[in-house]
Amino acid sequence: MTESPETTQRLVVAVDFTPASEHAIVAALRLAQAVPHTALHIVHVLPVDPWIKTDGMERESDAIAAATKRLRETILEVGARATGHRWDQTVHFHVRLGDAVNAIHQVAIDVDADMIVVGTHGRKGLEKLLLGSVATRLIGDAHLPVLVARPKELDGLPRTEKPAAATPGADLHAKRTDMTDTLQFGPRTTHISGLV
């Protein structure tokens, strides 16, 4: 792994070439743009075919090469659509064989990742029970934060009526309070000498 010594954040992004992956890529790119010196580790996992006998190594090697090429093309295409402008991003590509959850988690461990970003297919009910969910398994098994990306679909959902800010004498047992404040974090950047 050849990353810049100034890398501040490593994101592992799971890609299976479905629309769910695109949501994960877009979310990771937005995070990378917000935090300078972020490295993306894009992971695709190929299933192992237990029936491959004689030419298995050659077929696996061809599949890994094709998947790596497709990963690069996908990231460039999605990135161009998502950002709308040109910018540089450090990207590492990982193609693994085996169980998707185990392989993604292992890449995260190997690169000392700060977060795993994965999309969700939005399966529900019996389909989710039968097929399982990589995102759900990662949330339960991963030893680091997992961000599950999905499209923003708020149309038609009711909004909560926003009450006015609490005033003296108002009912403090209200079910909801809204407050906005500007907070400062970190050390002070100025110092006035002579004050005790």
Image (cartoon, rainbow, N blue to C red):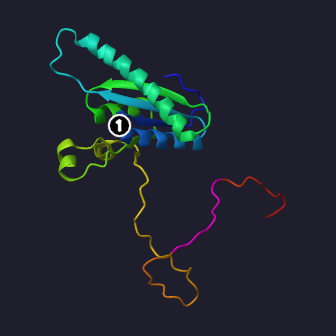
Q: Name, please, the residue furthest toward the right.
A: 194
Q: Name, please, the residue furthest toward the left.
A: 51
Where does the image place residue 161, in percent across and percent down from the top left? 47, 76
Residues in magenta, as a range: 178-186
Q: Name, please, the residue furthest toward the front.
A: 156
For the point 44% across and 84% down, the residue is 173
Where does the image place residue 190, in percent across and percent down from the top left? 77, 54
Q: Name above or below for residue 58 compared with residue 160.
A: above
Residue, disc 1: 18
Looking at the rendered structure, the secondary structure element under dot 1 is: loop
Kind of residue indicated by mark 1: Thr
Between 155 and 165, the residue placed more toward the observer is 155
In the picture provided, is 118 more to the left or to the right than 84?
Answer: left
For the point 37% across and 43% down, the residue is 119
For the point 65% across and 59% down, the residue is 184
Residue 22 sits in quarter: top left
For the point 24% across and 52% down, the residue is 124
Where does the image place residue 151, in percent across and percent down from the top left? 42, 50
Dot 1 crowding, Cα within 10 Å, few <14, some 14–19, many 20+: few
Where does the image place residue 145, in percent across and percent down from the top left? 41, 45
Q: Name above or below for residue 169 compared with residue 157.
A: below
In reply to whether residue 132 is colored magenta, the answer given is no
Residue 32 appearing in the image: no
Residue 117 appearing in the image: yes
Q: Name, please, the residue furthest toward the bottom.
A: 169
Number of marks: 1
Q: Name above or below for residue 140 compared with residue 157.
A: above
- Quadrant, the C terminus: bottom right
Main SS of the magenta part reads: loop
